[in-house]
Image (cartoon, rainbow, N blue to C red):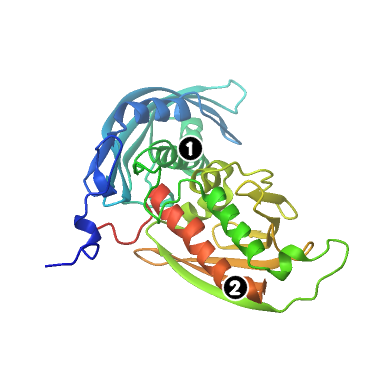
Amino acid sequence: MAKWGEGDPRWIVEERADTKNVNNWHWTEKNANNWSKDKLKSLLTGLKIDGAAGLVELKDFVSINGEASASNRKGKLIFFYEWELKINWTGRVNTEDMEEVSGTIEIPNLSEEQDICDIEVMVTVKDKTSGADAIKEMIRVKGAEVIRERLANYIDTLKIEFSQGMILPTTKGQTPTTKPTSASANLANEFKQTSISGSNSSSAPASKPVKIETKKISLKEEFMCSKEELYRALTEQNMVQAFTRSVANPFEVEVGGKFGLFNGMISGEFQQLAPHDTLVQRWRMKHWPEGHFSVVTIKLSQSSNCTTLTLSQTGVPSAEADRTKEGWKNYYWNSIRQTFGYAVNIF
């Protein structure tokens, strides 16, 4: 028999103020069907596609069939969605008589099993003219791209909206360590401890440059998502604010653009942006010597079943190397997995 305090933590009933789902062990689920239908309609209805062949506008939905949900299993978030969409469209051909044409757009399988770039967009046209064929081709190529962008917005927003409140706090207001409820508060507490322990970086006069020893840190992580999804999680303000659980201000995603995360605990600027592949940032923590920045390089590569993120960070103060490495794991990678359901192992 296990001694007091030495039991398997999975079987210990943690105190909860509302007695619900102790240790977040049981399966909980939120139905996202109605929300999803409204969201998809708002994103696609009225969407205009303009090109050399003419102008097209998506009208009413013929049908919207499927389901969506968000689940919490053992402290891990799982998002499920599967939709079949059919939408009417009308358009005008860029000809002298401004020929009017119409048809339908079908999306037979919008689901978590497909990357957004692989989602099929099928176009039909009622009219049998050269102008109608040109419009159809425009929708098939340019229109499909625009539609996929709107569908990506739906997926991202679904994960943000339905991640809230899925991991339940304990009576002490705590959640599992893999999902900090207030990352900025935890970081601030760490900085306070650094100051108390007599770190050179916190006591250095602002007016005098401080020469410090630095280290390079390297990390490699895997995420169950496409590299496009992971890149958006790192560069879209609403998604960054979701996994950091704080306001990202400023957050200017452009070369030379500034960013501030965790209520100013981390700041820097974007130096290089290669969409879906590479991010390079000047990056510092608030308590580092004034004016001292590290350089963070993040590269994304996608395999058949996951996306691998490799991080290289040079110029990290030697005394802060271990703390910084743990910070990336706890406040970035684990939080991204929990918030958006990108964990490699679901069970």
Q: Spatial distance from mark 2 to mark 1, Cα to Cα?
A: 40 Å
Label disc, if present, on residue 150 of the rendered structure: 1
How many numbered circles does the render carry?
Answer: 2
Quadrant of the image containing the C terminus: bottom left
User: Is 6 placed above or below 56 here?
Assistant: below
Residue 173 % position (x, y): 40, 42
Dot 2, crowdedness within 10 Å: few (<14), some or many (≥20)?
some
**Residue in the picture at 68% in, 61% down:** 283
Give the amino acid type for the residue marked by disc 1 in the picture: Arg
Mark 1 secondary-structure assignment: helix
At a point 26% along the width and 34% down the height, the residue shown is: 66
Front one among 253 and 100 = 253
Using the rendered image of the protein, determine whether residue 127 is visible from the camera's viewpoint: no
From the image, tell me which residue sits under label 2: 321
- Where is residue 108? Give x, y as percent: 30, 40
Question: Can you tell which quarter of the image residue 67 is in?
Answer: top left
In the displayed structure, does residue 130 sit left or right of residue 252? Answer: left
